[in-house]
Image (cartoon, grey):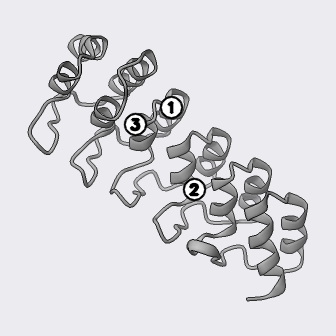
Amino acid sequence: MSPATRDLLTAAATGDTAAARAAIDAGADIEARGTGGMTALVAATKQNDVDTARLLIEAGADVNAKDDIQDSAYLYAGARGHDEILRLTLDNGADLKSTNRFGGTALIPASERGLLATVRILLQAGVDPNHVNNLHWTALHEAIVLGDGSTAYVEVVRALIDGGADVTIRDGDGVLPRDLATQRGYGAIAAEIDAA
């Protein structure tokens, strides 16, 4: 690995945009892998370092390149609500069908975490709201099972339904989303499903 490439990986991991720019100008390999198999872009995304991520994407970094745990800049930004970086990845070739280590699209962890703005961005981009992950859950299932039934999750469920989520898809145990909601006492979520 060249010194410039090493400098780039260090700069991306520490949020030093100026050093990252200097390393790129010195001929660093922007797709080189550092700790955990992360590219500089994945490292910058995990720091939510918008400036360095933008620099790398503008230099041609692959927004779909995955690290050792199957995180790409696109998937991680979507999962964590790093919406500025997420929009940059979407504008620069993000693979909407790309999946994480759980076989889920970016929409599923965004829904699990109640990240309404992120959920809306992903739905508008065209991510399939009915993708089923390795746990046999869709984004709707995760918002119910791993959410807390609060207003934020009610709004995520509404956004998913408005975005085309199928409320008749059963989980791996054959349970419907509405039943998952009522089992947990999430009446407002059940009402959203009924309205659909």
Q: Which residue is drawn at 63% across and 77% down?
A: 33
The image shows residue 21 at horizontal and vertical percentages of 87, 65
- Secondary element at image label 2: loop
Residue sitting nearer the eye, 141 or 186: 186
Q: Is residue 86 above or below residue 42?
A: above
Residue sitting nearer the eye, 9 or 160: 9
Residue closest to the far bottom: 1
Residue closest to the far left: 174
Q: How many numbered callouts?
A: 3
- Secondary element at image label 1: loop
- Secondary element at image label 3: helix
The mark that comes first in sequence, 2 or 3, is 2
Amino acid type indicated by mark 1: Leu
Q: Distance between the residues labelled 2 and 3?
A: 24 Å
Circles 1 and 3: CB distance less than 8 Å?
no
Horizontally, residue 82 falls left or right of residue 56, namely left
Q: How far apart are marks 1 and 3 (CA)?
A: 8 Å
Q: Which residue is drawn at 61% across and 51% down?
A: 89
Q: Residue at x 91, y 70 (%)?
A: 22
The image shows residue 120 at horizontal and vertical percentages of 49, 30
Circle on res. 93: 2
The image shows residue 1 at horizontal and vertical percentages of 73, 89
Question: Which residue lies under the disc numbered 1?
Answer: 115
Amino acid type indicated by mark 2: Gly
Circles 1 and 2: CB distance less than 8 Å?
no
Question: Which residue lies under the disc numbered 3?
Answer: 112
